[in-house]
Image: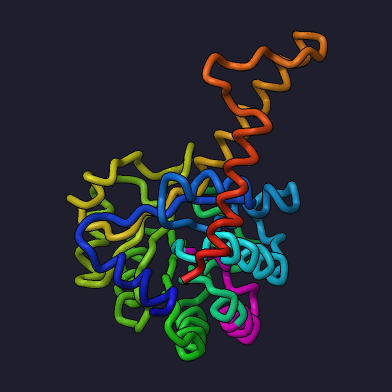
Amino acid sequence: MSHGSRLRDRIAEPGTTPLIGVYDMYSASLSAAHYDGMFVSGFGFAASYYGLPDTGFIAWPDMVAFVQRLRGAFPRHHLLVDIDDGYVDPEVACHVVEALERTGASGVILEDQKRPRRCGHADGKQVLPLDEYLAKLEMVLATRRDMVVVARTDATEEEDILHRAKCLAATDADVVLVDGVRSVEWIRRIREVVDGKPLLFNQIGGGKSPRLSLAELTELGVDVAIYSTPCLFAAHEAIDSALAELKRADGRLPAPAPDGGVGVAASTRLLERNIARRRTRV
């Protein structure tokens, strides 16, 4: 069974499917120990790979190369990939989708933002004319073989949100995402207009959307939840705290935790699992 089919089947199961945002191979290694699905977050990748905000700096060959490394280490995990606006040009978007499907991505998210783009939870977003986005989306849908395609709108005006969500649901896209949803009531309204089409909800720390459990999302009829930044923001806080403590201690490393904590041995064991997965590829 293809990676796309496996993700599509998982989404069709009862409940909300969680996909955890990863930004490098180490965060993915940790995520893989807890969840069977990953989301390759544009926010996290731009921050990790370039040290830049998520405003359109990502070059598609870098993203494809990262997904290739992920698939090698995690042959059975679901990998949903953020490809922003398809890197502007529709032909490029199709080329990237072909490359990612060959690499083993399970699915992609294609948004309707125009450049300069923004994080989906930032102010100042602008969207393409709907017919222009739909034409690009249709080209991508015609290009993919079995990959899951998530159609995403970043519309901010109430009437436009519902109109675009309904139009996206009428396409052959597998899933619909309205990013930056601000309330539970709006989740309900979007769920109603997309009818039976699977719905994706994006949770990001400090973002505009409400913080909801998987049980709450299931009750609202949400089929997929992507968690864009828990790994990135946890690393930010932990690294900053550890280095501040090292500075206070005049460069002396802290004593090992009673249970051994995270050191060379624990880190090596984590990474050795990636070698084992390669050897047991199915």
Q: Is residue 48 left or right of residue 100?
A: right
Q: Is residue 24 above or below residue 159?
A: above
Q: Residue 79 at what x, y percent from top left?
A: 49, 64
**With 18 as the anchor, is 136 left or right in this view?**
right
Q: Residue sitting at 64 percent across and 75 percent down?
A: 88
Whole-percent x, y for residue 241 in the image: 65, 21
Q: Is residue 72 above or below residue 172?
A: above
Q: Magenta stretch containing residue 97, yes or no?
A: yes
Q: Residue at x 46, y 44 (%)?
A: 204
Q: Which residues are magenta?
A: 79-98
Whether 11 is drawn above or below 95: the answer is above
Magenta stretch contains residue 57: no
Residue reaching furthest right?
250
Query: Where in the figure is residue 193, as x and y percent of width and height?
Result: 23, 68
Depth check: give the residue in front, 34 or 109.
34
Q: Nearer the viewer, residue 161 or 90?
A: 90
Q: Nearer the viewer, residue 36 or 206?
A: 36
